[in-house]
Image: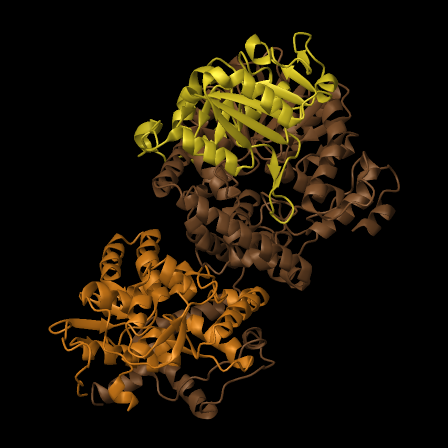
Amino acid sequence: MTVTTQPTHRERPGEGLTVALFATCITDTMKPSIPKAVVQILERLGCRVEFPRKQTCCGQIMTNTGYFDEGLSTVKNYVDAFGGYDHVIAPSGSCVGSVRHQHEMLADRAGDAALAREASQTAAATRDLSEFLIDVLGVEDVGAWFPHKVTYHPTCHSARIAKVGDKPLRLLRAVGGIEVIDLPEAEQCCGFGGTFSLKNPDVSIAMASDKARNAFSTGAEYLVAGDHACLMNIGGVLHRGRTGVRTIHLAEILASTQEETR
Amino acid sequence: MTAKEAILNKIRGALADVQEADPEVDIPITWTYGTALPTEDIIEDFVIKVEDYGATVVRVPQSDLPVEISEAIRRLGTERLVVPEGIPEAWTEPLTDIDLCSDEGPLSHAELNAIDSVISTCAVAMADSGTIALDHSTGQGRRALTLLPDRHLCVVRADQIVSDVPEGINALKPALRHGLPVTWLSGGSATSDIELSRVEGVHGPRTLYVIVVE
Amino acid sequence: MTASDKTLTADKPRLTPKPGTWLGIPPFPEAVKTELQLSQQRKNLSHATHVIREKRVLRASEVENWEELRTAAEQIKDRVGRHLDKYLVQAEEAMTAAGVTVHWARDGEEANRIVSDIAKAKQIEEIVKIKSMVTQETDLNEHLEAEGIAAWETDLAELIVQLGHDLPSHILVPAIHRNRTEVRDIFTEEMGRYGAPAPEGLSNEPTELTNAARAHLREKFLRAKMAVSGGNFIVAETGTLVIVESEGNGRMCLTLPETLVSVVGIEKIVPTLDDLEVFLKLLPRSSTGERMNPYTSMWTGVRPGDGPQDLHVVLLDNGRSDVLADPVGRAALRCIRCSACLNICPVYERAGGHAYGSPYPGPIGAILNPQLRGLDSKVDQALPFASTLCGACNEVCPVKIPFTDILVHLRNKVVEHKTAKRPTIEQGLMKSTTWAMSSGSHLEKVHWGSRMAGRVFRERWLGPMPMPLASRWLQARDAEPPPSETFRAWWRTHREGK
């Protein structure tokens, strides 16, 4: 792939850095355009991207449903896949949150001190894309171009577990041609909650409908978020309601460039 | 086994994982108690916060106090005023057309309920939260006196106002250690129980009128 | 609710309005189906929670060292919890020295019995009550009713619930599910049956409704010989009890009757008077979103000539020592019942309080009830799952209870409890997911299926479908089909050149 020169961002702050992409099981399987976008952004910024094929899942679907033994096996696999990398990048605040907040706990509870140590190391190296771009590479303007009206939903786990703060929004605001409209009640949960959406479908739908209504009320063409699971939930309602509002992952916007649009 | 023994035994069993016997060593508390809040003008802060609760506050020099009390009583529409033991006579002397009631009897609850207003001093006041604390000693009367009448006229000396709750608790510790009951008033009684919209005036005095004496 | 009472009260006329019952409320996922249909309740809840959220944020942001305060509160409560036996003994000694009769109750029944025995020894047939969560928990009112003693709730919202033959749905504002017009109708219909009637032509203005409550309750306050309260804090060093309130009904109950019985959970202790400064700054701002609640009462034993001359405190366990035994779950005992977690919770906002099947609803109910009552009932098994784990509660909690960690921990306990006897379908699903996720090569095998599906559906979105599990998702949402090429397949072709 050839890297095109960027109109606003000519430096390549990632030059010399090797990073591991944690695609996450959900986007690997269901939405490959998102990890592809991450690869595009990181390579554009000069990083060498690797994809350890052993990787699967952060395990939170098992852990958060109460299956700790099952969650533990994904911890082992995660450590195995990503151990030794200084930078593990995922396009998901939720999965990153689970890795950082739950992996060590699961190993501790299983009484596996060695695994707990390793899990805490890989967890410390694991970052959401927005954190890596701003905290490690020090860029807000990644040279993206997206001439559309968008509204941003800060997903709960990115905000409250991974604590990415306003980083995704800063990246979004620096995109060329974009118009970012505030989402009413942005910080309210969309109602996905993993298996919550199946165990408590009625409340989940009530919440997703309110979120979709708020997104529609902004007049935006796209609802942006940093977690595909939440986008599937809100997007499903937006699609059913024929609102015309589409969902898009932050990485997909950051990967778009003016050259591509032409 | 008594209930007490049973409960304490269960608790001790539940806390088998706690190794350190000294609570203060086990869990240190990283908080500095009794700290004053840096406030530019404590009295002004107190006035603003109390007014925010819908109460009336006036500031007067010591010499004008009896006149201001008369004015307050007129504005409150008081007919009968209960005067706790310890209120200076000079304060009530000008109130010639008001029925002044003493609690020496003491007054029954029914009698108190038929009195519309009460005057009292206070123990300490806290500016940041707009709180007046009574310790029900001299000048403040027993608790029922400042509860059953519908209007409460409270005289606060400027030097009784502290910046915030921590200093207030500090000031109240001797009274609490002596077994005095303490009542904190932050505005008049209020409720938000219907649709969370605030209504001022429920069972306690519906009107609080504060005179700050400087 | 009112219609069915009449048939049920055949043998003995009731002294107080017959309340609703928690029994028969199905587990959360089932219970919410009914609650979500109550459009008026949903409007009321949405309005009320939004109002209170904004107030809380405003008042918390005024305090510069808010985070330090929360940490201090967490530390104080942890200190108390981890040395509870010592502090309880210290508190009992201090209260006894101040002239309080201290009782201990293992469970709700024992506590209720203590209260009714005190009343009966004095031939008391009527009690006024300050809003208290703990006596909701022990169902004291119904125990007293059975003993021929009328218990009158005096907090405005509790009065609305009691007169409405209803159940509380919120820790702070038990009638939060009612709007002004419903309150007017309840007062007009019911007040006259139990005391001073509502004035003719009562409007639905909150001020008028509040005045009606004042008039209705005043005669009860003046004639009451005994009051029952809970307690927000007991100071171990001095034996001081603290109650925070707004309306003055608390002061009435704490001041006018000759006898006062305070039923207090054993976790309500704070070590010293100094510690009150932390909680009295945090609680009102977190709870009602005020700088300070209108009234706070503190009393240390009997004060001759002032207030009740016969004071009792009942220290209640009722499952708290079981909560304490769980090093992860015990953080729930830090709770000071402010209700900030309910007010911020998007699930509570839509489901309402009744769906939680307990006087403790919302996030705190979801972590407290299963710990206090155990995991044997389906209601309690469902509660840890009644959350999206969004974590909004973690952030507003003034004592920093890690709600989502405890929820996940309790989910694990529920799973262990349920699968202990026989394997479950869910467990099977989780095990196969785990197999798929245990290595990259396994996941690739699953991807074969998803890619096939992708080829079948192409890019056509999926609509409603009568398939188990999938239908729960698809009843209101469409779904994008899986792609015909996964990311790892793309990577293999484009980066590994295979």
Q: Position of residue C117 (x, y in %)?
A: 71, 23
Q: Residue at x 54, y 82 (%)?
A: A242
In the rendered image of the structure, the colour used to display chain A is: orange
Left or right: residue C477 versus residue A247 is: right
Left or right: residue C375 versus residue C38 is: left
Left or right: residue C468 versus residue C156 is: left
Q: Position of residue A81 (x, y in %)?
A: 24, 70
Rendered yellow, the chain in question is B
Q: Position of residue C353 (x, y in %)?
A: 61, 52
Front-lying residue, C303 or A88 = C303
Rendered brown, the chain in question is C
Q: Residue at x 46, y 82 (%)?
A: C480
Front-lying residue, C116 or C33 = C33
Q: Quadrant of the C terminus of chain C?
A: bottom left
Front-lying residue, C460 or C255 = C255
Front-lying residue, C327 or C334 = C334
Residue A178 sits in which quadrant? bottom left
As displayed, is residue A37 above or below residue C133? below
As displayed, is residue C99 above or below residue B58? above
Q: Residue at x 67, y 21 (%)?
A: C256
Left or right: residue A103 versus residue C412 is: left
As displayed, is residue C216 above or below residue A241? above
Residue B13 seen from this side:
no
Residue C211 sits in which quadrant? top right
Labels in figure, total: 0
